Amino acid sequence: LVLIGRDSLSVLEEYCRDLFINIPNRNTLVPYPYPHPKGQAFSPAELGKRIDIVPIRDIRSINILFPTYPVTYDRKSNVRGNGSKPKGRNPKVWHTYGASSYMAHMMSREDPGSILSYLRKRQWANSVSASTSSSFSDFSVFSITIACTDTGITEHVSDIVESVFAYLNIIRDAGALKWYFDEISALSAIKFRFKSDEHPFSCATIRASRLHDYPINKILSASWIEPSFDQEAIETMIDALTPEKCLLIVMHKSFDGKVDLQE
C-alpha cells in the first residue's frame, strides 16, 4: 500500500488505519520454494529454435530471447517490503537487477567497437536494444532486439545473429568490468537526480508494486540507482546468454507464404 497526498505523514497514516485496518493479515506462505524448478519461460525443447513471423505492420526485426533467473534488486538483502525473507528462496541462484542492467547497457551501446557500430557499418541494422522484457517470481526473459535494414533481414539474418553471439563472447571473455558498472551507476544517479516529476497516481501505483520486490527504502530509486557491483551475478547473467539457451524470433513480411501456422 502506498499513499501520496498533501497532508502530513501523521494524517496520511490515520487515513490508512481507518480505511485498511480491518483487512486481515493471513500470513499466507508461498506454496512452493522459488524459483520453482518447473517455473520456466520455455521448455528445453523450445530453446535453440528459430520462429519466423509475418507481422501486420512493416516490421524488420530479430528478437533473441533468453530465459534467465528472476531479477531482484539486491541479492544480499533479498527481502520483502516488510523486511521478511520469503521462505524457500535461494538467493544464490538469483541474479540481481544490476546484472540485468549491466548487460542491457553493454548490448545497447552505440560507440565504436559496439555490436551496433559493426552492424551499421555493414548496413545490416539501424538499432540494437536489450532489456529484461519480462520478470516474474520464477523466471525472467532477457531480450535483445535488432531493428534491421531490408538487406539485413532478407539476406543476413544468420550473419547478424552470429555477430551478436560473437560480441557476447567478447563480453564473456572480458568478464564483469567494475569501471563500466561504476560509469553506468554514475549516469543513472544523475538521471534520477534531475528526473521530471511523476503523476501522483502513477507514482503510487508503481511504488506499491515495487514493495513486493524491493526493500522499502529503495522503492523510489530502485529503477534508477544501480545496486552495488556484483561480479558473480553479472558473470552468471553473461553465461546464460548462449545460442542453445535462446529462442530466436524473426519478423518480416517476406515470410508471407512461407510460414505454416496462422494465429
Image (spheres, helix red, strand yellow):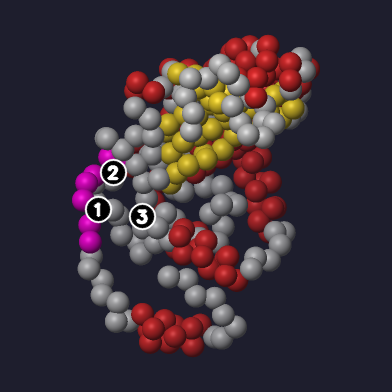
Q: In the rendered view, would you say 178 is above or below 75?
A: above
Q: CA distance from mark 3 to mark 1?
A: 14 Å
Residue highlighted by disc 2 = 34
Residue highlighted by disc 1 = 30
Three-letter amino acid code at disc 2? Tyr
Check if residue 32 falls in the magenta segment.
yes
Task: Tell me whether circle 2 and circle 1 mark residues in contact (CB < 8 Å).
Answer: yes
Query: Magenta region's main secondary structure?
Result: loop
The answer to which of 180 and 49 lies nearer the viewer is 49
Task: Tell me whether circle 3 and circle 2 mark residues in contact (CB < 8 Å).
Answer: no
- On screen, residue 236 versus residue 250, left or right, reads left
The residue positioned 21% from the left and 51% from the top of the image is: 31
The answer to which of 110 and 74 lies nearer the viewer is 110
* Label 3 environment density (alpha carbons within 10 Å; few <14, some 14–19, many ≥20): many
- Give the structural element (helix, strand or loop) at label 2: loop
The residue positioned 74% from the left and 20% from the top of the image is: 150
- Give the structural element (helix, strand or loop) at label 3: loop
**Would residue 90 be seen by someone viewing this image from the given angle?**
no
The answer to which of 47 and 70 lies nearer the viewer is 47
Q: CA distance from mark 3 to mark 2?
A: 14 Å
Residue 57 percent across, percent down from the top left: 67, 35
Check if residue 225 falls in the magenta segment.
no
Which range is magenta?
28-36
Residue highlighted by disc 3 = 79
